[in-house]
Each structure stands twice: as structure tokens, then as C-alpha cells.
Image: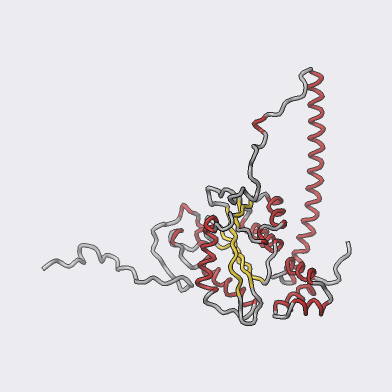
Amino acid sequence: MKGSRFTEEQIIAILREQEAGAKTADVCRKHGISGATFYRWKAKYGGLDVSDARRLKVLEDESRRLKKLLAEAMLDNAILKEISARNGEARCQADGRGPRLRDPRREPAAGVPGHWGGPDGGALPVATAGRWAAARAATIAGLRAPPVRLLAMVDDFTRECLCLIADTSLSGLRVVRELDTIIAMRGRPLTCVSDNGTELTSMAILRWSQDTRVEWHCIAPGKPQQNAFAESFIGRMRDECLNETLFGSLAQARSVPAEWRRDYNEVRPYSGLGNVPPAIYAKLGAPAMQRDGALRSTGGFAPRPVAPPSPTGSNSEQTLLSPG
């Protein structure tokens, strides 16, 4: 295969020029590349540093080698099964019993929906543990910055925001890369739920779902309530952060939502989790939560209470005024 004439350092430097405000056509003309090549680089190296790009190349080579070993092992397994089946049929015919019949109870049930569900978007899992939800925010427009798109991944069980991607364009390959990073830190989920965005219904996502054996359900069009936790997170972030900030650069469009995400995960008390932040809830576990704790705000983005709580013992018999 013919290698690229650009190194990872040069590719990242070219992407940085476009992120700094230069037009894509001017960048492509300057370096003698096509627009398709530029966006292919952006999908692969967008948001990465030089060290991250080198690490990504090493991981790609390792993944290619492991896939080859897996394909060879699966081929050997299929050959052994075929030989074993032929030997079994030969023994049955020698005994005069004929070929063995398959057990219908072991056959897969007909009409089982695939990863994308039925016409209604697929049935959602009953339990939320082990389910991640993806949602997209509206495009952010700044003064001198190009339009930025946001994608959030939320854990439906702990309400924790697992990642918050901000870039001028998001592809299925970029989403797959972020998902692999989260799985390396937290483990593999059982199910992922998302809307019908182009980057979330791409062939890259379908291939990733089949390789990792993670069920991917798309909600029905026009039914955001089927992805309630992620849509609620996006709405809260839009009201408290995006609508309150005028972004002037791509770096600011990444840093400000990232700081708000840190406050949401680690500082802000969540009433549905016993008034503790989602990150603490994920570490302690549900059985250890105190569901009736007092609301405590420690200087984050969370709205302040309208009135302070009443003093302890203000409703006791000793503090009540006697009539007359």
C-alpha cells in the first residue's frame, strides 16, 4: 500500500490551521490536497495531539494484527466444526439412524429485531444500568469562530456525562474513537441509545456495534422522550452554558463546555441521586446513597435556592410561641 507523503505531525499542523480560522479551500490549495483528503484527516486526527496520533497509529497496527489472528482462529474453528459434523452424520448413517435432527428450541426466534430496532425505533431496555445515551446539541455560532457541533454521551444509570465532543464536524469514525476511549476507562456497556443523526447511523457505528457486541438502538424520529436522560442533559447545558456564552474561537467552544461538564459531574448535586454529584454516585454505588440529604451548592453553575432552609428545631415545641 502506498504510504502518505505527510507525517502525523504535518497532518495535525494542517488541521490546526483550519481550526485557527483559515478557510478549508485555502488550506487545501496551500498544501496541495483535496477536500476529501482533508476531511478524512479531520475524521481520523481531529482533536488529537502529536503524541496521541502516534499512539493511535500503534493501536491501529495492533488492532489489525489481532483481527488477523481472530479471523484465522474463527476459520480454524469453522473447519473443525464442519469436520465434526460430517463425522457425526457418518456415524449416524452407519448405525442406521440417519442424520440427527436439530433441536428447534436452540434455533433463533424469528422476527428478532436487529441493532436498529423496528419501525418504532426499537424497544428500550427495562434496566438503565449499563446503558449509554448519545445526544447532539444545536450548532454553536460565534463571532469569529466557525460553527461548532457538540455531541454528549451520558450514562443513564449514574447521569454522568462520559464525554463531550466539540468540533467543526463530527463523523462516525470520530464517535467510534471516543467510544473506544470511554470503554478503555469504564468498560463496555450493554446498550447505546441515540437519535437518527448521520454520524450516529453511519456504517462506522454499525461496524463498531457488531465488533464490540454492543446493541445500538435508534429512537423513533420525532420522539426525543425515548432518550430522555441525554436530552435533559443537553437542555440543561444549553440553558446554563451555551446560551450564556458568546464563543470567539474553537478553543473556547471546547474549554467552556468542558468546565461546565466537570462542574456537572463532580460539584453539582443531583436530586434524583440523593443530592450528590453523578461522579460521586458512580463511585459509591446506589445502595450507599442517602436519598434524603440536604441540598448543598458549592459555588458551581447550579442555580441557587430561592430561600435558605429553616433552622434546625424551629418547628419544635420549645420554639413555638404560646398563645395569649
Q: Nearer the viewer, residue 103 or 188?
A: 103
Q: Residue at x 68, y 66 (%)?
A: 170
Quarter of the image with the C terminus in it: bottom left
**In terms of depth relative to the viewer, which is nearer, 145 or 319?**
145
Q: 317 or 7, which lies in front?
A: 7
Residue 105 point in image, percent of width and height: 64, 31
Q: Quadrant of the N terminus?
A: bottom right
The picture places residue 67, in percent across and down from the top left corner, at 78, 51
What residue do we see at 61% from left, 48% from top? 118
Q: Is residue 13 visible?
A: no
What colour scheme does the image use?
secondary structure
In this rendering, the answer to whether 112 lies above or below 66 is: above
Residue furthest toward the left?
A: 324
Q: Residue furthest top?
A: 96
Above-or-below relation of 144 to 61: below
Instruction: Report how many numbered discs are placed on residues in the image.
Output: 0
Q: Is residue 295 left or right of residue 114?
A: left
Residue 86, position in %: x, y?
81, 29
In this view, 118 is above or below 86: below
Vertical relation: 50 (above or below) 227: below
Q: Name the residue located 57 percent from the left edge and 52 percent from the top edge.
A: 130
The picture places residue 208, in percent across and down from the top left corner, at 70, 54
Quadrant position of residue 153: bottom right
